[in-house]
Amino acid sequence: MAPNEATLTASGIARLASVGRAAVSNWRRRYADFPTPVGGTPTSPSFDAREVEHWLRRHGRLHHAGTEQWAWRHIESYQPATQISDILGVAGALLLVRADQTTTTDTDLPTPRQLVSHLRTLDPGLAELIGDVLPGQWTAQLTTLLRTVDQLGAEQGPEAAFEHLHNQYVASAHSLSGLAGTPDVVADVMLTLAGSGARTFDFTSGTGSLLRMAADRALRNGTPTRCYAQEINRQYAVITLLRLWFVHLRARHAGHDVEPPVVQIGDSLLGDALPDLRADVVVANFPFGIHDWGHDRLAYDPRWAYGLPPRTEPELAWVQHALAHLSPGGTVVVLMPPAAAARPAGRRVRAELIRRGALRAIIALPAGLMPPAGIGLHVWVLTQSDPHQPHAADLLVVDTTTESATRPLAEIVGTAWRAHQSDDRAELPGVHRTVPAIELLDDQVDLTPQRHLPQASELVATPAQIIARMNEFDRLLDDMRRILPAVRETSATPLREAPQADIADLIRSGSITVQRTAIRSRTTGVTSSVAVLTAADVLAGSPATGSAARSANDDPGPQVAAGDILVPVIGRKISARVATPAQIGATLGPSVQLIRVDTDRFDPWFVAGVMSRPDNARIAGRASSTANGALRIDIRRLAIPVVPLDQQQAYGRAFRQLVEFRAALDQAAAAGAALASEIGDGLTTGTLGLAPPSVPTARTR
């Protein structure tokens, strides 16, 4: 095989066949006609892509994939692997040329020389960067890759196709973890704070996520912005420039007269490539903790207007670099590590930023939005201080972690920022507050938002709220008394003398069916995520809260219908529940089994009630290997009493009342515990006093 032909690694074969790498190794041992390696090493061989595809197709093992999946697989499997970032740039250049060819019908693949020539008419700098990595002519491997990318561009549009490939790239190991892109949810927050302007600058652009979103927003608002970037990684800079050019072409096609984007390559601190640039918006997600940032060489740099950053505080150097590139009235928004708000070494620079009104807001984000996943990063908002204007005397602090589960982050932050900028400095306890500068300028200058916000657990309800909740608790207790079914002492009941029927026999007769969801060990070609009903949902009577990835070819699994009985597979006892209205239509999760009865013969509430008898766990349960001390419930082992349908329905109503009573009891327990805590807090803080016995209280009627 010629060295320029397309090859696949074992991982690439596994993705094509939707199996694990172990399966590929087994095929090599078991099938004599499996293609032989054409390169690589004994432990990491490579194979001829065409031979592998033909073999998989002959054996019926080729996973059906769309063009977008094939395009990324060709890029990801490109050899040598060290050039994958460059090849993504070449693919983007081809798509950019297609996007610019608004009137041509030529579908032939341009030669490398033709590609560079067309790029030169758009951006000579981009043409030079792409030309540096192009071969003299397309290899077989590149031809296959680019034709697939070209097809993807024809199907989705060139810009959408490149954005898909970019998103795959930043989620892969090839992009050096979180150094390449900024997640959309974080970028949305930052740009909500930054606003827009005629010039937008990112001095550590990565692959251009912040600038691309800023340019796209500005264009949709009818006020395009010119983007400037500097990036030390050449491959990232190329990707940034390509992404910005796609948006710029859209602006041109819409009739806007705007200048093209500018992207420079180099170290922003040691080699500022745009020293004269003053931008209206400066945004950045720079690398943290780089102590060899040039402290000794930049000791007398004019950018340090707020003090020389200590060697251990590179983030404060980045912040002052951003301010040095900001025009009057502009806004800087940067991501920061939480430690930068409190480290002792940086307190003098932080204090100067506060005194001179440059630092306007610090927002704490929830952990897990981006690497490092275990840390909730901060967003700092700064403005260029004006010596002719009075300095801002306060700082907005926002803690989004308390509200992020109920509202979008951008909405939380945007609401707080708009309130801070207005004359009405609205505050939300535990979420955001405007802090006077005098409170911050102490020995530590600790700007951590949580330090200056009372947490939700520390907040005391108002006396009126506590009294109202006491009355609500009384009503809840009264409702619980009414829920209990009316019963009496008796020596004989229909259930005691009724004959027993094995559920296994009822299943064979067809009057009862049992359904389970198959557990999939691996799901590939994921096209959607579906909500599934978990065991916890069954016990709580809540809607489906679980989720599962599913491809277009997957069996959707059983769906819950009205009257179905749901039983967790594992538990210390049998907990059978009739599906609630909110659970109807949900997909059954693997931890739940579903029982469907013939309603002409059985009442679902009756069957659920008699199945849940405590002694049944000894019959239906066997030791579980997945939960300590729990049982794996096999309902086929059970027997249920057989009584006429009208008697089943009478008992069913009672069993239903008991389920409602247990739910109300749990609600009362939670409400009572919270109420006791609030009353205790009210008494200790002095907002509540003890009422004399003659004075009516919430408990007197």
Image (cartoon, helix red, strand yellow):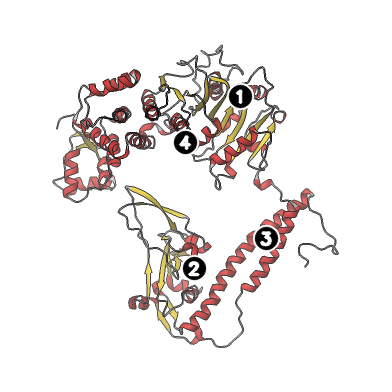
Q: Could you tell me which secondary element the residue under label 3 belongs to? A: helix
Give the spatial CA distance, label 4 vs label 2: 41 Å
Identify the secondary structure beneath mark 1. Answer: helix
Quadrant housing residue 132: top left
User: Where does residue 265 sit, x and y in percent of width and height?
Assistant: 40, 19
Query: Quick check: can you spot residue 42?
Result: no
Dot in front, 3 or 1: 3
Residue 371's disc is 4
Give the amino acid at mark 2: Ser
Amino acid found under the numbered disc labelled 4: Pro
Q: Are marks 3 and 4 in contact (CB under 8 Å)?
A: no
In the image, taking residue 98 as reference, residue 421 lies left or right, namely right
Residue 403, picture quadrant: top right
Q: Would you say residue 486 is visible in this rendering?
A: yes
Pointer 3 or 4: first along the chain: 4
Distance from label 2 to label 1 (Cα)?
Answer: 58 Å
Question: Mark 3 to mark 4: distance in Å?
Answer: 40 Å
User: Which image quadrant is residue 385 in?
Assistant: top right
* Label 4: how many Cα within 10 Å (few below 14, some 14–19, many 20+): some
Q: Mark 2 points at which residue?
A: 575
Tell me, for residue 364, which label it has, or none. Answer: none
Q: Which of 226 and 94 is in front in this view?
A: 226
Which residue type does callout 1 highlight? Gly
Q: Earlier in the sequence, mark 4 or mark 2?
A: 4
Q: Mark 1 points at which residue?
A: 346
Q: Please give the label number shown on residue 672.
A: 3
Residue 412 lies, in percent from the top left, at 58, 41
Q: Distance between the residues labelled 4 and 1?
A: 23 Å
Q: Which of marks 4 and 1 is nearer the N terminus?
A: 1
Asked if marks 2 and 3 touch (Cβ < 8 Å), the reply is no
Question: How far is mark 3 from mark 1, CA to CA?
Answer: 47 Å
- Residue at point 54%, 73% (across, down): 656
